[in-house]
């Protein structure tokens, strides 16, 4: 798919991997696409909220200001120094104040950008003590989610739904057969690896985008503030079916999560999968 075009939809029945969470429960889809919309997904973590603030309050105004300044300078040069208005060209080769200005001012702009960006990078890369650990293994062309031994030690593959399998409420090219579930308000550590080529695990609403590399374990984290269904995709070109490798995460209450977990233990107990997460899923 192309760029991310997302907005809010509500009132969709909770979807699971065959497990019964609650027949009467509905989840708000906060990460679903709307045709023609431009902008970020609705943020569901503090990291993504800060990313949007950094873009809207720092990068966008600076980009617009520089673009307008360059446009004004070009217009002035065309008007002031065209052949008719200035038939005799100046022989000046240097202007010390101007050269100092165009060296110092861009440096100051970079400082303005750097200070909040370093804080944001630290916020993304320094993982707080996790309440959950979810192992994510990429393959051509699907994801495998591994839950810890303390919660059943199961893992399962998550593949895109084919058009013929779509049900009401599903989203073409984003809905999967087995979605991952996490409880709301918990710090989730993601341990991401690949079994074949380089992939990229991306969930825009969570501010998560991390490469899955063979032989290397990369880590990321998020803490979802609201319940709902959130989508992402592999964002590295990983092969012929790269466009059919979506991510679907359901953020639910602790009770709904426990109900899903009980069903998932039975459903995926005998599934062939990769190593599961080694740390405790939810701390007391």
Image: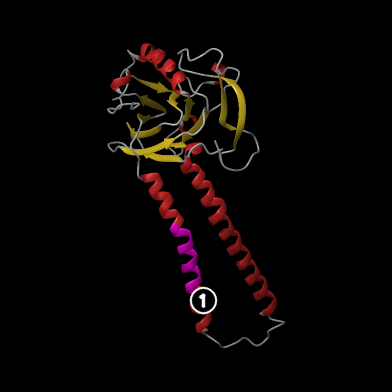
Q: Mark yes or no: residue 199 visible.
A: no
| Magenta stretch encompasses residue 89 | no
Give the residue number, with chain letter if any, for mark 1: 101
- The foreground one among 30 and 70 is 30
Point out residue 184 in the picture as x, y percentages from the top left corner: 46, 28
**Which element type, helix, strand or loop, lies under badge 1?**
helix
Looking at the image, which residue is at 53% across and 49% down?
Answer: 53
Q: Is residue 138 above or below residue 122?
A: above
Figure quadrant of residue 118: bottom left
Residue 35 on image: x %, y %: 64, 34
Where residue 42 sits in the image (x, y, percent)? 56, 38
Number of on-image labels: 1
Residue 112 magenta-highlighted: yes
Q: Say few, some or many: other residues with alpha carbon within 10 Å of mark 1 (under 14 / 14 to 19 / 20 or more).
A: few
Residue 224 in sight in this render: yes
212 relative to 175 in the view: left or right: left
Whether 114 is drawn above or below 163: the answer is below
Q: State the image coordinates of residue 280 (x, y, percent, origin top left).
A: 30, 26
Q: Which residues are magenta?
A: 103-115
Task: Name the quarter where the C terminus is drawn.
Answer: top left
Q: Quadrant of residue 185?
A: top left
Main secondary-structure element of the magenta-colored stretch:
helix
């Amino acid at each position: 798919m192309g760029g991310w075009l997302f907005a809010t939809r509500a009132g969709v029945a909770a979807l699971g991997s065959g497990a019964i969470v609650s027949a009467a429960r509905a989840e708000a889809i906060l990460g679903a696409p709307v045709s023609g919309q431009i902008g970020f997904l609705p943020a569901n973590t503090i990291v993504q909220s800060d990313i949007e603030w950094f873009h809207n309050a720092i990068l966008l105004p600076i980009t617009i200001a520089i673009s307008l300044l360059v446009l004004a300078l070009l217009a002035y040069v065309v008007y002031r120094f065209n052949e008719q208005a200035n038939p005799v060209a100046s022989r000046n080769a240097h202007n010390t104040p101007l050269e100092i200005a165009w060296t110092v001012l861009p440096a100051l702009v970079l400082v303005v950008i750097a200070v909040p960006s370093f804080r944001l990078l630290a916020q993304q890369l320094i993982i707080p003590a996790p309440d959950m650990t979810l192992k994510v293994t990429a393959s051509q062309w699907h994801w495998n989610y591994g839950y810890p031994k303390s919660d059943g030690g199961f893992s399962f593959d998550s593949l895109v739904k084919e058009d013929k399998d779509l049900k009401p409420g599903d989203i073409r090219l984003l809905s999967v057969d087995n979605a991952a579930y996490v409880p709301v308000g918990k710090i989730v550590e993601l341990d991401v690896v690949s079994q074949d080529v380089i992939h990229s695990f991306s969930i825009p609403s969570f501010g998560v985008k991390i490469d899955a590399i063979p032989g290397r374990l990369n880590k990321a984290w998020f803490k979802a503030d609201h319940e709902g269904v959130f989508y992402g995709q592999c964002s590295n070109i990983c092969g012929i079916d790269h466009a059919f490798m979506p991510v679907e995460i359901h953020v639910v209450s602790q009770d709904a999560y426990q109900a899903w977990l009980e069903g998932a233990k039975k459903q995926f107990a005998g599934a062939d999968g990769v190593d599961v997460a080694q740390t405790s899923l939810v701390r007391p």
